[in-house]
């Protein structure tokens, strides 16, 4: 029971610090000082230390000797392009593997997520990620799912900086519905194509927003 309580506190600390980073409250290069985090999160140092180690593994935080934990610098443009190429290929493969393994319960969950996303809620990104997670998990290839999740985490800070607008969400919703219909059809080529379109669509929005915000082309 004590171990479970400790784990829950660590998870709570992880989620709160992650959300501060992804919401822009903690910007790249910001030092994450234990005493300050204790006051901000109202949690002890033990759970916060564990959370920072986990965030370091995800790439959102870097633990630097003699400096402590700092919010990591986002990946370069070249890295983002390579990451999205890898994501498109890997997640499409996982989705194809999931075609015959998705259960009726899985499809009900996906349908419910689609309905929630149609309302364009503030947590649209989290619902989007859950939609992808359910499909990846159904593939039965947990190690590859972990790699896919790591690729997403490596660009989460970038995804936060370049916020998706309502028209972006509407576009993603249509693409998610296409993925859902493709999975129901059990057509591997169709599933692969819809996944690739959705992931590359996210990249195009990042490139477009990057160019508008910084007034330099994303190449």
Image: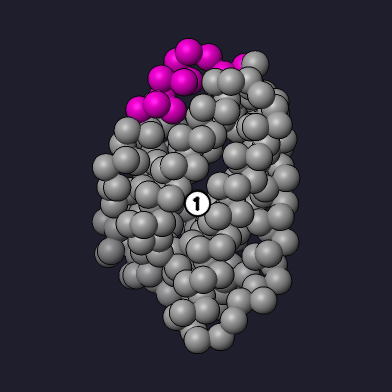
**Which residue does the image show at 57% across and 25% down from the upper left?**
183
* Residue 102, magenta (yes or no): yes
Regarding residue 35, the answer to whether it shows in the image is no
* Residue 93, magenta (yes or no): no
**Secondary structure beneath label 1:** helix
Q: In front here: 29 or 215? A: 215
**Which residue does the image show at 44% across and 69% down from the upper left?**
161
Regarding residue 208, the answer to whether it shows in the image is yes
Q: In front here: 114 or 58? A: 114
Looking at the picture, how far across and down is residue 22, in whole percent?
42, 62
Chief SS of the magenta region? helix
**Which residue does the image show at 36% across and 57% down from the upper left?**
167
* Quadrant assignment, res 101: top right
Which range is magenta? 101-112
* Way the structure is coloured: one colour
Residue under numbered circle 1: 50
Looking at the picture, how far across and down is residue 196, in whole percent?
64, 45
Looking at the picture, how far across and down is residue 92, in whole percent?
67, 38
Q: In front here: 126 or 18? A: 126
From the viewer's perspective, tell me whether residue 143 is left or right of residue 169: right
How many numbered markers are drawn? 1
From the viewer's perspective, tell me whether residue 54 is left or right of residue 173: right
Q: Quadrant of the N terminus?
A: top left
**Which residue does the image show at 40% across and 60% down from the upper left?**
164
What crowding class fits label 1: few (fewer than 14 Cα within 10 Å), some (14-19), or many (20 or more)? some
């Amino acid at each position: 029971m004590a171990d479970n309580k400790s784990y829950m506190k660590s998870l709570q600390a992880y989620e709160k610090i992650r959300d501060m980073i992804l919401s822009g409250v903690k910007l790249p290069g910001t030092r994450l000082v234990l005493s300050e985090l204790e006051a901000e999160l109202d949690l002890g140092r033990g759970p916060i230390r564990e959370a920072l180690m986990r965030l370091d593994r995800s790439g959102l935080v870097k633990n630097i000797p003699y400096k402590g934990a700092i919010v990591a610098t986002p990946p370069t443009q070249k890295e983002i392009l390579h990451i999205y190429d890898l994501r498109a290929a890997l997640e499409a493969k996982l989705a194809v593997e999931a075609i015959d393994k998705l259960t009726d319960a899985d499809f009900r969950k996906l349908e419910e997520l689609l309905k929630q996303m149609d309302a364009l809620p503030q947590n649209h990104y989290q619902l989007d990620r859950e939609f992808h997670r359910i499909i990846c998990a159904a593939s039965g290839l947990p190690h590859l799912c972990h790699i896919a999740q790591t690729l997403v985490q490596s660009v989460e800070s970038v995804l936060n900086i370049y916020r998706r607008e309502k028209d972006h969400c509407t576009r993603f919703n249509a693409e998610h519905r296409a993925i859902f219909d493709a999975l129901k059809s059990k057509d591997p080529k169709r599933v692969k194509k819809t996944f690739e379109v959705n992931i590359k669509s996210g990249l195009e929005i990042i490139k477009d927003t990057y160019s508008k915000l910084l007034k330099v082309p994303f190449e």
